[in-house]
Amino acid sequence: MTQDISLSFYKPEHLPELQSFTLTNDDKRFTSLPKEVLSQALGIQDRYPVVILKDDLPVGFFILHASKETLASYSNNPFALLLSSLSLTAVHHGKGYAKKAMLLLPAFVSGYFPWCDEIILAVNHLNIRAKHLYMKSGFLDKGRRRIGPLGEQLILHHFL
């Protein structure tokens, strides 16, 4: 069951579990481990690391970006946030935790970023599982594309 899933901004007590995350081989192609992106996110203003918790155990991670410079290549909306680096540790795949987290995301964003009216993200066109997750969680494909490290990325939008 997923009723005990919650979102929390990163706290130092999350670090040991985040450092032990592993990714499936498929996920390694499309996302980063928290330990690969966390220190940079903590060191840059307008980046907000978020932890997906099952009870109090970190099971997932992503970063919210508010920097207009970062957002510029994704959207011209000054009130948008960019979601990046979503990962779920391999042992917790297939349990619905990522979907529950994405369903909690709009309320989380509205609570902490009341000025935000849109969440955007880029998903590789080959990452069918992630694309399906985002679409089932309320993200929309408005036809915008960009080229990423592995080719075409779809820019998806969740309007708040």
Image (tube, grey):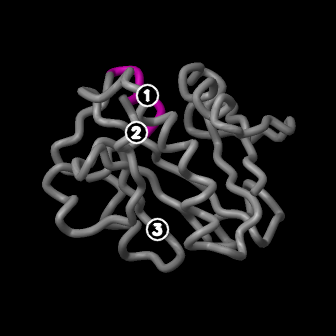
Amino acid on which the number 1 mark rests in the picture: Gly
Q: Is residue 28 magenta?
A: yes
Question: Spatial distance from mark 1 to mark 2, Cα to Cα?
Answer: 10 Å
Mark 2, residues whose alpha carbon is within 10 Å: few (<14), some, or many (≥20)? few
Question: Spatial distance from mark 2 to mark 3, Cα to Cα?
Answer: 24 Å
Q: Position of residue 120 (x, y in %)?
A: 69, 51
Secondary structure, mark 2, is loop
Residue 3 occupies which quadrant of the picture? Answer: top left
The residue at which mark 1 appears reads as 96
Image quarter hosting the N terminus: top left
Mark 3, residues whose alpha carbon is within 10 Å: few (<14), some, or many (≥20)? some
Secondary structure, mark 1, is loop
Give above or below for 1 relative to 74.
Answer: above
Q: Position of residue 150 (x, y in %)?
A: 57, 31
Left or right relative to 137: residue 40: left
Amino acid on which the number 3 mark rests in the picture: Tyr
Q: Which numbered disc flags the more N-terminal residue, 1 or 2?
A: 2
Give above or below for 85 relative to 153.
Answer: below
Question: Which callout, 1 or 2, points to the residue nearer the camera?
Answer: 2
The residue at which mark 2 appears reads as 3
Q: Which residues are magenta?
A: 25-31
Q: Position of residue 25 (x, y in %)?
A: 33, 21
Residue lying at 59% horizontally and 20% vertically, measured from the top left: 128
- Residue 48 bears which disc, if any? 3
Left or right relative to 125: residue 20: left
- Dominant secondary structure (helix, strand or loop) of the stretch shown in magenta: helix
Question: Which callout, 1 or 3, points to the residue nearer the camera?
Answer: 1
Residue lying at 75% horizontally and 46% vertically, measured from the top left: 157
